[in-house]
Image (cartoon, rainbow, N blue to C red):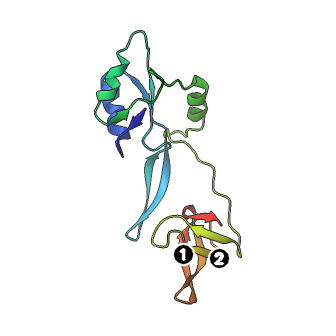
Amino acid sequence: MQTQVNAEIKAAINLGQQGYSVYLPRYLKRRSHARKVETVARPLFPRYLFVAIDLAAQRWRAIQSTLGVSHLVCVGDRPALVEDRVIDALKVREDRSGFIELARRPAFSPGDQVRIVDGAFVDSLALVEDVSDHDRVAVLLNLLGRKVRVFVGADLLAAS
């Protein structure tokens, strides 16, 4: 089922109140904002959540008008089916707090060329200068004709 933008939790709560069983897989993301670093829960599949529906017993078309819901993903005129093994595979990867544990990004090495994927320097190419730990990477950006050292979160870099 697809939700409205940033309404995954609202949709899950409202569907739960209607008696539907809902699964919203989430993970913890490190976010930097205004010189502050925090860890926030984010949906693994933004704008999507899973709803268990008994097609014979439940009025599943009511899902379409639930607050927070954009629309039910259908194949033809019937809700799309996700096999139980897919949901089970996601649940197996959850930690004790119920968050999906994501694999660490591959480490970058000095000399690697990378692309910044978010933040003030989005889509800029840079050269890895130093990797201090798994979370922070010193990169050299070419700004105004000179190389400038900038520290970037490793989660904001992609191989170029």
Q: CA distance from mark 2 to mark 1?
A: 12 Å
Q: Position of residue 2 (x, y in %)?
A: 41, 36
- Quadrant where the C terminus sits is bottom right
**Is 6 left, or right, of 153 in this rendering?**
left
The answer to whether residue 136 is left or right of residue 46 is: right
Crowd class of label 1 (few under 14; some 14 to 19; many from 20; radius 10 Å): some
Quarter of the figure with residue 92: top right
Q: Nearer the viewer, residue 42 or 64?
A: 64
Q: Which residue is identified by label 1?
A: 151
Above or below residue 14? Residue 127 is: below
Which one is earlier in the sequence, the residue at label 2 or at label 1? 2
Residue 39 horizontal/vertical position (percent): 45, 55
Q: In the structure shown, which secondary structural element does the residue marked by tag 2 occupy? A: strand
Give me the residue at 28% from left, 33% from top: 67
What's the amino acid at mark 1? Phe
Mark nearest the camera among 2 and 1 is 2
The amino acid marked with disc number 2 is Leu
Which element type, helix, strand or loop, lies under badge 1? strand
Residue at the limit of the structure toward the top, as seen here: 56
Number of other residues with Cα within 10 Å of mark 2, as a class: few under 14, some 14 to 19, many 20 or more: many
Q: Total number of numbered labels?
A: 2
- Specify the quadrant that holds the N terminus: top left
Residue 15, given in percent of the width and then of the height, sits at 34, 27
Instruction: State the residue at coordinates (58%, 65%).
Output: 157
Residue beneath disc 2: 127
Q: Are marks 2 and 1 in contact (CB under 8 Å)?
A: no
Query: Would residue 19 be seen by someone viewing this image from the given angle?
Result: no
The picture quadrant where one finds residue 110 is bottom right
Residue at position x 50%, y 69% in the image: 122
Q: Residue at x 42, y 9 (%)?
A: 56
